[in-house]
Amino acid sequence: VMMKMPRMATMTLSLSDHPTIVERTMTCLDTHQRNLQGWAGVLANIGRVCSQLSKVDLRNAEFGDDGAASLALGFVDHPALETINLSHCKIGDAGAKSVGGIVTKTREVILEHNFIADQGAKFISDAISNTLARTEILKLGDNQVEDQGAANLADGLKATTHLKRIYVSGNLIKTKGAKELATAFKASSCLEMFDISGTTLEPEAVRA
C-alpha cells in the first residue's frame, strides 16, 4: 500500500517487529500479558506523548473491548497517525464503538479477525460517513458481520467521500447483504473496490 509521508519525521509502533519502541521503553511490563487492559492503557499513553507516530501495529494484542476503550483515549486525536492495525485483538461491538474516533481520523484501519458483528458494523459505518472522516482503506475481514451489518455498512458507503477500499471477506454476509454493498459500491463516487470473497453468495449478488 502506498502511503503519503507526513512532513515531520515518522515513527512506527509495532508489537511484531523486534526490537520495538515499546519493548525498549516499557521493559518492566511482561510481554506475555499484552492482552490486559493495562497494556492497552500503556500504549494509549505512548500515543499521547509520541505525536510523530504514523503507524501503529497492535495485531495479536488480544486486549478486548476494555482495552480498545483504553487505547482509543490515547489515539483518537493523534495528529500524525496514518495506519493502525488492530487485527486479532478480540474486539467486539463495544470495542468497535470505542475505536470509531480512530477510524474517522486514520487513513488505513485494519480490524480483521475480531468479533465485530452487526451493531459494531453500524458504529464503523457512522465513523466512515462522518463529514470529517479521512479513512481511505478499511479492512473488516473475518469478523461476524451478517446481512444487517452489511446494510449498515452500505449506508456508510453511500455517505462517505473518502473511502477507496473496503474489505469484508470471510464474514457471515449472504446474498441480501451483498446486494446492499454492491448497490452502494456502484453509487459511490470515491470507492474503487470492495472485497467480499469468502462469503456465501448466490451469483446474482455480485451482479446487483
Image: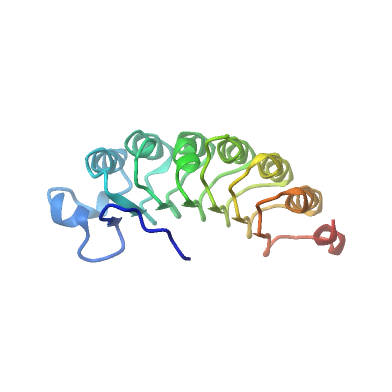
| Residue that appears at 67% across and 45% down | 157
Q: In this image, 190 relative to 17: left or right?
A: right
State the residue at coordinates (12%, 48%): 28
**Residue at the far front in the pictured view:** 7
Does 89 sit left or right of 31 as displayed?
right
Look at 80% across and 61% down and name the residue there: 206
Q: Quadrant of residue 127?
A: top right
Q: Quadrant of the C terminus?
A: bottom right
The outermost residue toward the right is: 204
* 181 sits to left or right of 2: right
Q: Is residue 199 above or below residue 154?
A: below
Q: How is the image coloured?
A: rainbow
Between residues 75 and 198, which one lies in front from this camera angle? 75
Residue 36 picture location, percent across and down: 30, 43
Where's residue 121, x and y in %? Answer: 61, 41
The percent position of residue 50, horizontal first and vertical second, equals: 23, 45
- Numbered circles on residues, count: 0
Q: Is residue 138 left or right of residue 148?
A: left
Residue 132, position as x, y percentages in the image: 52, 36
Residue at horizontal 59 percent and vertical 50 percent from the top: 163
Q: Quadrant of residue 73?
A: top left
> In the image, is residue 66 above or below residue 168?
above
Q: Nearer the viewer, residue 4 or 18?
A: 4
